[in-house]
Image: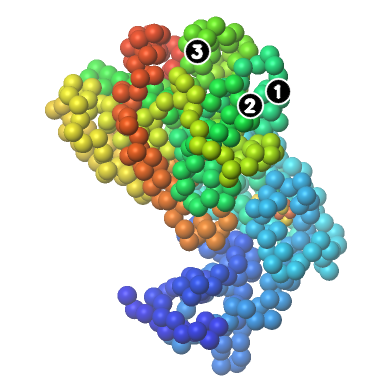
């Protein structure tokens, strides 16, 4: 690789040719602020916050560091009075059209605009104050709110949505009237938004946020007539810590269980249990479809963002979806049937709260055909961020918490359940089950490493019990679309496909802690969080779903066997063909 020699703030540096000034500065340990820049997704040089000075024959000029490549001999200045003034003026202009309500803003403390205003001494008054646009807040979607009054038109959400191959939001109108919206100024609910929340995690301000269910959950906890059960998805244990200042990839399972106990839930269970249950049902469904000549490839159905995409964009393919409910929904269904019966609790009094990495889960629990007991399987689905906010509101000092265990009997999961949190995890867990189910022998090596990693499409072929199984693990809707084109054309020879809507899987879900662009652009967020997931799997005594004692108990006591009639009634669902427009 050809290297070029440059100077940043007088310091000599050698960097690969083609590097942008922004990246070169990182090599020198200098962080240049950005608002619109998202590596490989939104490289548009629009916000002008990253301006730096570059020396030239006719004097220094201001350029955008995020899109300007370095060249031999370039001299760059990142911290001059002119640079400072330019950034400050940009911030003042942004604030002049901004609803400044930091005190009650959902992003106060994690807002990239607020942080820059503090650093550049820009206060509430703007010398550019004048006419301000007032935008109607879009609350039409099931999972999120869009508030253009706090939007700075960085277009990160638009790029994130396009990167998901959905593209239901964009910049409407021009000039002073420019705003982010959908076609014909209709609310988001009118379009086939898949509810993935990738726009939210990429937004630098409080313009986008999930619908908040924390108040309702607190009310349920404080209602003496309710029995409130919480369960936490596999990935939450490796991401929740980030909301309390822990390093990316820190496993805080014990502190999380302790916090949930202190919040006052009646039972604190682990969604890993129902991830194991999903494997028993889905693995059985896969083997049945292969042996009986059923519809193949079988495609996983745990990711509601992906299910939404399939129903809206590939409705003719819905028979490829596994009929299994997601782990969130299976958990709720089991709570209000088997558990209610076993503990002699009226299911009407049970409130199931699921802590999920995903905003689409808020829509999933409202789907028809998801109420096995006659009551909704899951009452509230909250994001990792909402759980963190509840812990903070309750005055719980997360740092001081001891490590505690989940409650019994459904606090026990296996490594196979934990790895659901990363792309390829469901596939690997299913293979750990299918291989033993086909051979009747215990597996020597339970690690199917070919389907691990953060790439968008991973393929592998395994021979298990004399059966050749061609599989793929896919994450990100753009990759799902590429694979689905092959499925639709009949040119796809996989028997089993795992699809997760969010790039990297649940560890990078739209409900996960929001990291600023400086982290999203330069730290391998998906990789570090996934690494913590596989570490957790390695350290667990049980690593196959079929070995979970709670799974054995529930089939012995209630369902009979995987795929039984009763299991189908309670743990399986159906899908609906939908169009690209909802009205
Ligand atoms: S978006 Fe940021 S700057 Fe605007 S009100 Fe919220 S915290 Fe304050
Ligand atoms: S939730 Fe996903 S699909 Fe919907 S607007 Fe946001 S990025 Fe697009
Ligand atoms: S909604 Fe957020 S991400 Fe989208 S343009 Fe506005 S500030 Fe940027």
The disc placed on residue 222 is 1
Labels 3, 2: front one: 2
The location of residue 384, given as percent across then percent down, is 57, 39
Sequence-first tag of 3 and 1: 1
The answer to whether the residue labelled 1 contacts the one labelled 2, judged by CB atoms less than 8 Å apart, is yes
The location of residue 222, given as percent across then percent down, is 70, 23
Sequence-first tag of 3 and 2: 2
Label 3 sits on residue:
339
Residue 385 in sight here: no
- Asked where in the image residue 60 lies, by quadrant, the reply is bottom right
- Say which residue appears at 82% left-offset and 56% top-offset: 132
Q: Quadrant of the N terminus?
A: bottom left
- Say which residue appears at 31% left-offset and 23% top-offset: 546
As helix, strand or loop, the secondary structure at mark 1 comes to: loop
Q: CA distance from mark 1 to mark 2?
A: 8 Å
Q: Is mark 3 within 8 Å of ligand 2?
A: no
Label 2 sits on residue:
264
Instruction: Check the image and report above or below for 414 versus 562.
Output: below
- Say which residue appears at 58% left-offset and 82% top-offset: 77
The location of residue 155, given as percent across then percent down, is 61, 56
Instruction: Check the image and report above or below for 439 versus 463.
Output: above
Sequence-first tag of 1 and 2: 1
Q: CA distance from mark 3 to mark 1?
A: 22 Å
């Amino acid at each position: 690789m050809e290297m070029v020699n440059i100077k940043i703030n007088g310091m000599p540096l050698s960097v690969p040719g083609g590097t942008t000034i922004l990246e070169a500065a990182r090599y020198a340990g200098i962080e240049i602020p950005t608002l619109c820049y998202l590596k490989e997704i939104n490289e548009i040089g629009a916000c002008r916050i990253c301006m730096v000075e570059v020396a030239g024959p006719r004097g220094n000029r201001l350029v955008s560091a995020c899109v300007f490549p370095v060249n031999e001999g370039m001299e760059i200045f990142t911290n001059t009075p002119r640079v400072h003034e330019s950034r400050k003026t940009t911030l003042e202009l942004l604030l002049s059209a901004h609803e400044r309500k930091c005190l009650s803003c959902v992003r106060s403390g994690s807002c990239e605009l607020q942080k820059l205003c503090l650093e550049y001494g820009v206060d509430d008054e703007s010398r550019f104050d004048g006419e301000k646009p007032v935008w109607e807040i879009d609350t039409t979607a099931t999972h999120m709110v869009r508030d253009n009054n706090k939007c700075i038109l960085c277009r990160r959400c638009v790029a994130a949505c396009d990167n998901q191959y959905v593209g239901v939001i964009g910049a409407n109108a021009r000039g002073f009237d420019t705003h982010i919206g959908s076609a014909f100024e209709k609310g988001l609910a009118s379009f086939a938004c898949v509810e993935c929340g990738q726009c939210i995690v990429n937004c630098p301000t409080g313009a986008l946020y999930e619908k908040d269910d924390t108040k309702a959950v607190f009310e349920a906890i404080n209602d003496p007539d309710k029995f409130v059960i919480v369960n936490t998805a596999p990935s939450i244990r490796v991401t929740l810590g980030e909301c309390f200042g822990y390093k990316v990839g820190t496993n805080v399972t014990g502190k999380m269980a302790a916090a949930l106990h202190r919040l006052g839930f009646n039972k604190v269970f682990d969604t890993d249990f129902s991830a194991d249950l999903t494997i028993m049902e889905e693995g059985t469904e896969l083997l049945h479809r292969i042996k009986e000549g059923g519809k193949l490839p079988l495609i996983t159905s745990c990711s509601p963002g992906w299910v939404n995409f399939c129903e809206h964009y590939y409705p003719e393919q819905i028979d490829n979806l596994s009929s299994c409910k997601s782990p969130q929904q299976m958990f709720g269904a089991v709570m209000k049937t088997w558990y209610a019966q076993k503990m002699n609790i009226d299911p009407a009094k049970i409130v199931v709260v699921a802590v999920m990495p995903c905003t689409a889960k808020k829509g999933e629990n409202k789907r028809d055909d998801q109420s096995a007991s006659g009551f909704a399987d899951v009452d509230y689905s909250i994001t990792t961020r909402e759980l963190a906010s509840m812990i903070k509101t309750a005055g719980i000092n997360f740092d001081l918490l001891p490590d505690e265990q989940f409650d019994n009997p459904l606090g026990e999961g296996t490594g196979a359940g934990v790895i659901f949190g990363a792309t390829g995890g469901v596939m690997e867990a299913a293979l750990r089950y299918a291989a033993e189910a086909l051979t009747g022998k215990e597996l020597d090596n339970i690690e199917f490493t070919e389907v691990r990693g953060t790439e968008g499409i991973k393929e592998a072929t395994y021979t298990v019990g004399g059966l050749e199984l061609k599989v793929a693990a896919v994450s990100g809707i753009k990759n799902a679309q590429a694979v689905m084109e092959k499925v639709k054309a009949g040119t796809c020879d996989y028997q089993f496909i795992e699809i997760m809507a969010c790039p990297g899987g649940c560890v990078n879900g739209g409900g996960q802690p929001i990291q600023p662009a400086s982290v999203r652009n330069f730290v391998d967020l998906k990789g570090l969080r996934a690494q913590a997931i596989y570490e957790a799997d390695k350290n667990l005594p049980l690593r196959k779903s079929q070995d979970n004692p709670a799974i054995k108990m529930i089939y012995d006591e209630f369902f009979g066997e995987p795929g039984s009639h009763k299991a189908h009634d309670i743990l399986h669902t159906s899908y609906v063909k939908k169009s690209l427009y909802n009205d």
